[in-house]
Image (tube, rainbow, N blue to C red):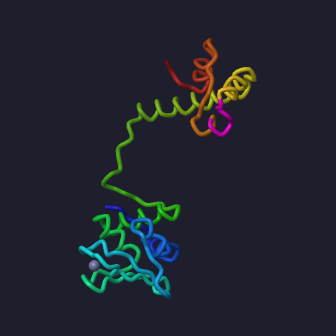
Amino acid sequence: MVRIREDDINEIRNKAGIVDIISRYLPVYRKGKSYTALCPFHDDHTPSLSISEDKQIYKCFVCGAGGNVFSFVQNYEKITFPEAVVKVASLIDYPLDYEADDVREKIDPHKETLYRILEDTIKYSMYELNNTEAKKQYLEGRGLDERVRQRFEIGYNPPNDALYRFLKAKGYTD
Ligand SMILES: [Zn+2]
């Protein structure tokens, strides 16, 4: 079960434009004040799906499919209502906090520590690279500019035990 707050559901529905969301899935054509598309819910050969930007609903005059932005995504993707809300939220970059209690994993403390070590290692290596002008220039020369280095978290580890000492100082045991 995914639990989403009612306020979030309303806000996502208000923020998501139905024409925008449907056009992520199908080509949508403008027709006067409304929009049309080939209906994905029956074997459609003429655009029978009518989409109203004003009312934020869609309706197929042949098979009767209709609803709002959530029902479209739910029926198109064959997912549950809460899953459709999560999907729409991600399509419009809405920061949604929700609880998915059937997928909540027990966090293994050992793995948790390993992940933290990895993160610290990345931070340390990126810091080292930024303080090693020659290495930076070498990478620049190979087309790996600042943006690429940040994006792929490229770093440099000096050939000594500095990383080991850094992690030790952060309290990690052998
Ligand atoms: Zn239809």
Q: Relative to residue 165, is residue 92 drawn left or right? A: left
Q: Nearer the viewer, residue 165 or 86?
A: 86
Quadrant of the rendering where the N terminus is positioned: bottom left
- Is 88 rendered above or below residue 121? below
Identified at 57% across, 26% down, the residue is 171
Position in image of residue 102 (x %, y %): 30, 54
Q: Residue furthest front?
A: 45
Position in image of residue 151 (x %, y %): 59, 40
How many numbered discs, if any?
0
Find the magenta span and give its range: 143-148
Position in image of residue 69 (x %, y %): 41, 75
Q: Relative to residue 139, is residue 6 drawn left or right? A: left
Position in image of residue 83 (x %, y %): 35, 63
- Is 98 rendered above or below residue 61? above
Identified at 64% across, 32% down, the residue is 144
Q: Nearer the viewer, residue 101 or 37?
A: 37
Q: Relative to residue 156, is residue 76 drawn left or right? A: left
Q: Quadrant of residue 109?
A: top left
Is residue 173 shown in magenta? Answer: no
Q: Residue furthest top?
A: 160
Q: Quadrant of residue 143?
A: top right
**Where ligand 1 lies, by quadrant?**
bottom left
Identified at 36% across, 66% down, the residue is 82
Q: Nearer the viewer, residue 128 or 33?
A: 33
Is residue 144 shown in magenta? Answer: yes
Q: Quadrant of residue 147?
A: top right
- Is 116 rendered above or below residue 133? below
